[in-house]
Image (cartoon, grey):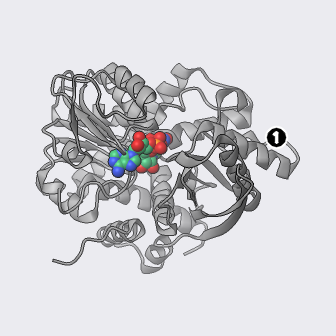
Amino acid sequence: MAKEELNPFAIAQKQLDTAAEIMQLEPAVHELLRWPVRELHVTLPVKMDDGSTEIFHGFRVQYNDSRGPTKGGLRFHPHETIDTVRALAAWMTWKTAVMDIPLGGGKGGIICNPKVMSPGELERLSRAYIRQVGRILGEDMDIPAPDVYTTPQIMAWMMDEYAFMRGHNVPGVITGKPLPLGGSAGRGDATARGGMYCIREAAKLLGINTQGATMAIQGFGNAGQYAATLAEELLGIKIVAMSDSQGGIYNPKGLDGAAVIAHKQNTGSVINFPGADNVTNAELLELDVDILTPAALENQITGENASRIKAKIVAELANGPTTVEADKILYENGSYVLPDFLCNAGGVTVSYFEQVQNAYGYYWKESQVHELLDEKMTAAFHSVAQAAEKYKVDNRMAAYIVAVGRVAEACKLRGWV
Ligand code: NAD
């Protein structure tokens, strides 16, 4: 058997190719949408606390801006690659389109290990990134946001550096800011909350009662931790397993999300949580649960383990957790996949609300944000479910068909193709 493709950008292109074939997309439109329109590679010298200077490398990819300014997160990760950033920028393009918000897709990243850097080093790195990349950012051009291992504090430093470059405050240049700097109420848990609205709609469609249904969550950062508390609060779901980069925990009787968060804060990991068994990340994925929520990194469900996944619903809060080969297996086995760029679109949707509020200089109540997010997620879910029905394809392909159709239309209306 040929080796499975794990390069995220090759996967993103392959997914688009399949959609293009089903939609009979014109060859020029298809080729345009296979590539980022623009990308910037930067080299960043940063003074470290010990007096040395370290050289970091970073990227910003603007994938497609036909529907509006590009938007997408920034990741700080030791294994960041340009192809990962390209793939994520592509998925942002499809995500903003499937949500029908007036933005394009972008993504950025720096190859670094924030876990071993001091706050001062992280601040200098964040500012250095903006000094290079700031020239292609702007509230009408490209708007970053937090992603893996980046935080509201990092967004605040970046916004501040950008304000110095422009000579005045520009709060709308970056989202996911702390509230006192123009962040939006409801941004913190938006990704997980949007995912819960999707799970709710999927459960209704499949006739699954979420009260008491079981869920395993892989990854325990922003997306995973909020999922752990909101799943129970909004849908009555019982969380039975959770994990982080060090491993996972399992208790079929249920785990208290808030207590696991406190345990991780005290010990640095979810593992060794009192009353639960330790499991590996691989074992967690294969547990007998109703809902599996990957909320960590790419390529977790592959051709190798997909046939052992038992969950009825796979809710992809992470980007790219499922490979192309795994997708086929999950579809054949009847797992209902809520694809990443639909399921985790709550984050970018509230980021968009943040931009709107920054532009108005008027801020909404958290309850308004939740209501508008629910409206957007529910509408997007049903447009995807209808496309899946119409074209007899899995939900990922259906989401592609909806999103690619909208981006292709914008490219054509602009006269690009
Ligand atoms: P984060 O940095 O807050 O958390 C990442 C978590 O994953 C950490 O708990 C880490 O320990 C864990 N992890 C790392 N490697 C792992 C592994 N091999 N196995 C299990 N766990 C592992 O990041 P986040 O913001 O929660 O993002 C998680 C995923 O969700 C990413 O794919 C990201 O692109 C996606 N996402 C996040 C947002 C958002 O608003 N935060 C929005 C859309 C998509």
Asked if residue 342 is positioned above or below residue 372 in the image, the reply reads below
Kindly identify the amino acid type of the residue bearing the numbered disc 1.
Asn
The answer to whether residue 169 is left or right of residue 86 is right
User: Dividing the image into 4 quarters, which one contains the N terminus?
Assistant: bottom left
Q: In the rendered image of this protein, does residue 413 appear above or below residue 153?
A: below
Where residue 268 sits: x, y (%)?
43, 34
Displayed quadrant of residue 411: bottom right
Image point (52%, 31%), residue name = 188
Asked if residue 87 lies left or right of residue 17, the reply is: right
Nearer to us in this view, 157 or 33: 157
Residue 177 is situated, as x and y percent measured from the top left of the image, at 64, 36
Count of labels in the image:
1
Which quadrant holds residue 357?
top right
**Which residue is identified by label 1?**
169
Q: Residue furthest front?
A: 50
Q: Nearer the viewer, residue 218 or 378?
A: 218
Quadrant of the image occupied by residue 258: top left
- Mark 1 lies on a secondary structure that is loop
Residue 263 location (% of width, % of height): 38, 25
Residue 345 in view here: no
The image quadrant in which ligand 1 is located: top left
Q: Residue at x 17, y 56 (%)?
A: 305
Picture layout, residue 378 above or below residue 234 = below
Question: Which quadrant is home to the C terminus?
Answer: bottom right
Q: Residue at x 15, y 27 (%)?
A: 252
Tell me where residue 369 appears, x and y as whole percent.
Answer: 53, 27
Q: Badge 1 local density, few (<14 within 10 Å), some, or many (20+)?
A: some
Q: Is residue 399 left or right of residue 308?
A: right
Nearer the observer, 59 or 337: 59
Position of residue 63 relative to residue 224, above or below, is below
